Amino acid sequence: MKLTEEMLKALPDARGHFGAYGGRFVSETLFDSLLTLEREYKRLKDDPEFQAEFDRDLAHYVGRPSPLYFAERLSRETGGAQIWLKREDLNHTGAHKVNNTIGQALLASFLGKKRVIAETGAGQHGVATATVCARLGLECHVFMGAEDVKRQSLNVYRMKLLGAEVHSVQSGTRTLKDAMNDAMRDWVANVDDTFYIIGTVAGPHPYPLLVRDFQSVIGRETREQSLAQAGKLPDALVACVGGGSNAIGMFYPFLTDESVEMYGVEAGGLGIETGKHAAPLSAGRPGVLHGNRTYLMEDENGQIAGTHSVSAGLDYPGVGPEHSWLKDIGRAHYVSVTDDEALDGFRKLTRVEGIMPALETAHAVAYAIKLAATMDKDQVVVINVSGRGDKDIHTIAQLDGIEV
Amino acid sequence: MSRIEGVLKALKGQGRKALIPYITAGDPHPDLTVDLMHTLVSAGADIIELGVPFSDPMADGPVIQQACERALVHGTSLRQVLGMVKTFREKDNATPVVLMGYLNPMEAMGQEKFADAAVEAGVDGILTVDLPPEEADEVAPLFTARNLDAIFLLAPTTTDDRIRAISEHSSGYVYYVSFKGVTGAGKIDVDEVASKVSHIHELTALPVGVGFGIRDAATAAAVGRVSDGVIVGSVLVDTIARNQADPDQLKRALSDLLHPMREALDSLAS
């Protein structure tokens, strides 16, 4: 399907649907808040004062634009297309997540909400939320699965230093999905004074819309930078997909550019065939969770399946509804790489370019290297380096049998 | 007339209020659920809300979350829950049963298949917590065509326009969630509930059941005074959790909890 600007403008529709996906599947108590948020966002979106403040924060607080860097040595070693890196890892707080938290915290301020809640997996979104809350003087509560609290202890401490309260979630599988459940439960109880900053392009409408809008700065910059530096549009974009916020931010401004191929890389875990993975687009089916209809990992009875990934940030059984739509219409390709391949990608980028990617990002790196090898020298592959790997040092060291 | 409508009309005619207990199917064990349903009826239940366990019960507090986990340990599936209702119907053809749960297990079965199976099992109503009427276009006609009541939630945050719209999509009764929060949390503010429910009564002719925060005879009576029925969930589920090791004691404990609520509600009739 060839996408046009008009088609994109019509999505999501009035009820928050991207084709068959998206929507607002929440209990009644939250419904009015979602309607208010949607109304206010649509008003502020075109408000020059709001936009100017957002742009100013991205420039002077986040440090945008982030560079588009030609990974010359990696490209040479790979022996195919030119590999370029969009350096979201250089943002303040070390990942793309902050683009969205700046935007949503600004919304919270405009709406007069003083209390903020967020869910987090790897802790990057939690840190990015705690950061903007510290700056704006907002009370901040972060929900994090007990399993992730353990494997991302560094980020937990960062959040605490920033003044956030971190709630360790003991229910269910004790990972990101359970953190999101508890954040929703908190929101229902405190809906009058609380703003929920969702970290990914999932959740009930309007979240997939506003997170995508805030993250689209990634793709807009990449488009300009690629034209200026590589002299052409990229031939392929590669980004990792957990909930899919960095991927949609990179893809969205290119959706009408037919020549640009897009690859979303899911967490293949121990291998798709083992069932121990977090790749709903590769191996799941449509269902309803966390307020939206989308591809999910579930069992035959509709119970949400446990997921596995070496990276906490991809360890999620669902995905943003717009990705589900892009998959069905064939505009983007969704693939997966295993834990081991991702670890190879981590080591490769670290050793060849001196850039240590987050384990989430390492999935995109691993796939992009495979992809670039099959392409021509004059072609351009852009990897969205969604985050830096400092937070994963403990995990890597543990795998290497080293105590740090 | 649906079984739910019939029961609620008859109660209204007698000036009585409906007692609607909730338990999670499969908790503490799938073999016990049908027995517990009969126990609830003997103790005075007019309608039973039977929870379909879900792995991610976002609108529920810890008590019902843990009930879901206990039920899922034994692999309690929607198909099995329907089987329980069918077995319940062998001895009880009068008490309406409402399935209460989340959308995904129903979607996984296939909505049409689910609607057929629910009718066949003897289910009377469906309450899907995470399905607002706005998203129910496809499924609502399937229920209507089979005379299954679609029961939707109203909340303290629901605006008048939505109360009207939701009531139009509802049949049987509407379920008013008494406070902002998850099940089993918070304290019910009876005055606030009274004013909201009387307002809802102005906007719809449907009976209004009130749930969340009803834990004893006193709260049941206070809420019964201003509504058409009370829904009791977490306190029963908590009783199940505390007595799960001994089924006979469990049944006694459930009866001991419901009886006084029944009496308190019936004392309002005079």
Image (cartoon, coloured by chain):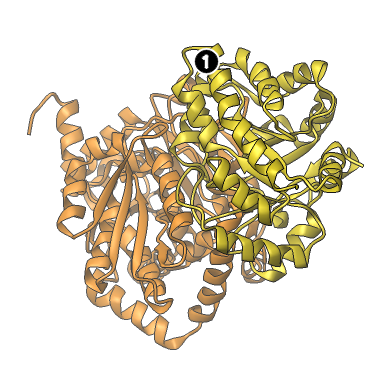
Chain colours: A orange, B yellow
**Residue A104 spot, x, y in % from top left:** 40, 68
Quadrant holding the C terminus of chain A:
top left
Q: Residue at x 77, y 38 (%)?
A: B125
Left or right of residue A171: residue A281: right
Q: Residue at x 50, y 61 (%)?
A: A207
Taking B168 as reference, is A54 above or below it? below
The amino acid sitting under disc 1 is: Gln
Q: Residue furthest right?
A: B1
Left or right of residue A24: residue B87: right
Q: Residue at x 66, y 68 (%)?
A: A10
Q: Residue at x 60, y 39 (%)?
A: B232
Q: Chain of mark 1?
A: B
Taking A222 as reference, is A118 above or below it? above
- Taking depth in this image into account, of A327 and A126 the one nearest to the observer is A126
Q: Residue furthest left?
A: A404
- Which residue is under mark 1? B249
Taking A363 as reference, is B29 above or below it? above
